[in-house]
Image (tube, rainbow, N blue to C red):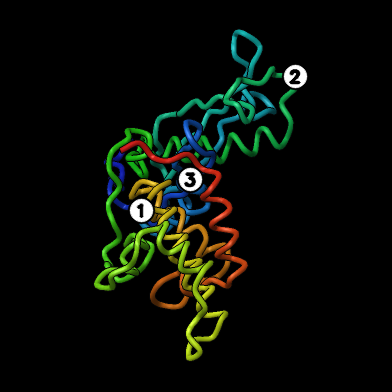
Amino acid sequence: MNTPVFPNLAGVITLSDVKQKGSGSYAADYVPWAKITQLLNEHANGWLPELIAEGSSYVHKAPNGTGYLCIQFVNGNCATPIWPYAITDNRNNPIPYDKISARDLADSHRRGLCSAAAAFFSLAYELWARDEVAQASNPETVETQPEIQLQQGTPKPAARQRKALSTNSEPSASVPVKETLQQDLINNAVDLIQLKLDRTAQIAWIADKATKWNLDAAGSKLQQMTVDQLQTCIDELSGKPDIKK
């Protein structure tokens, strides 16, 4: 097969595509495999991933008795080189060949596809190389702007002062109690976002919550959350370690 000049997809992913799993020293940024394939379909249309079989099996046996996949992208008569990818468990340990399940194969295939896309097309290479991921082109979406901008131009008391106000002060008769409670929760969430997450993680975390709860209206995603959703966010953020300054 001929080897063409491959599409260069460096810079295609944006901060709104980046998710985070784990916490503290175990936190890891990633782009979901479904997003990677969508971007491939959009920017490298015609390039399809294939598994190379060994005999009747797609799992190749390593010398030490573990298994790996061989992945390549094909476009008509053109193909990338073969990209080997180890079949591992959720702790990234290689799995013995005779214990590899269908789930292990499928999970490693999805991860291997992303790895090969980074290798051949530079798609999401930034996460592997620890390079900065660009913001999306639309600066108005909350996914590309820290939620702390909610409070810009509006002086607000410090966190401890706000806590005292919320516990010791009666809400104004002209402001519904529910709205007062919701604003207190938003303020608390904003403080925790600043305290617990760096800029990249802030955007990814908010985007993840917006996707989870279908918060698709324009403007602040925190303001679109219900009281219960805000409390869930606060509980989750409270369990995270403070970021190092």
Q: Which residue is mark 2?
A: 98
Dots 1, 3 in contact, CB < 8 A: no
Q: Tell me which numbered mark, 2 or 3, is placed earlier along the sequence.
A: 3
Q: Residues within 10 Å of mark 1 (few under 14, many from 20)?
A: many
Q: CA distance from mark 2 to mark 3?
A: 32 Å
For the point 45% across and 59% down, the residue is 206
Label at residue 57:
none
Label 3, secondary structure: give it: strand
Q: CA distance from mark 2 to mark 1?
A: 40 Å
Q: Amino acid at mark 1?
A: Leu
x and y percentages locating residue 17 in the rendered image: 41, 54
Front-most of residues 126 and 4: 126
Left or right, residue 164 beside residue 89: left
Which numbered mark, 2 or 3, is in the foreground of this view?
3
Which numbered mark, 2 or 1, is in the foreground of this view?
1
Q: Residues within 10 Å of mark 2 (few under 14, many from 20)?
A: few
Residue 26 lies, with reference to residue 21, above or below; the image says above
Residue 196 lies, with reference to residue 166, above or below; the image says above
Q: For residue 218, which quarter of the picture?
A: bottom left
Front-most of residues 57 and 132: 132
Q: Amino acid at mark 3?
A: Gln
Q: Amino acid at mark 2?
A: Asp
x and y percentages locating residue 205 in the rendered image: 46, 54
Q: Tell me which numbered mark, 1 or 3, is placed earlier along the sequence.
A: 1
Quadrant of the rendering where the N terminus is positioned: top left
x and y percentages locating residue 146 in the rendered image: 34, 59
Left or right, residue 219 beside residue 67: left
Label 1, secondary structure: give it: helix
For the point 46% across and 40% down, the residue is 114
Q: Which residue is mark 1?
A: 15
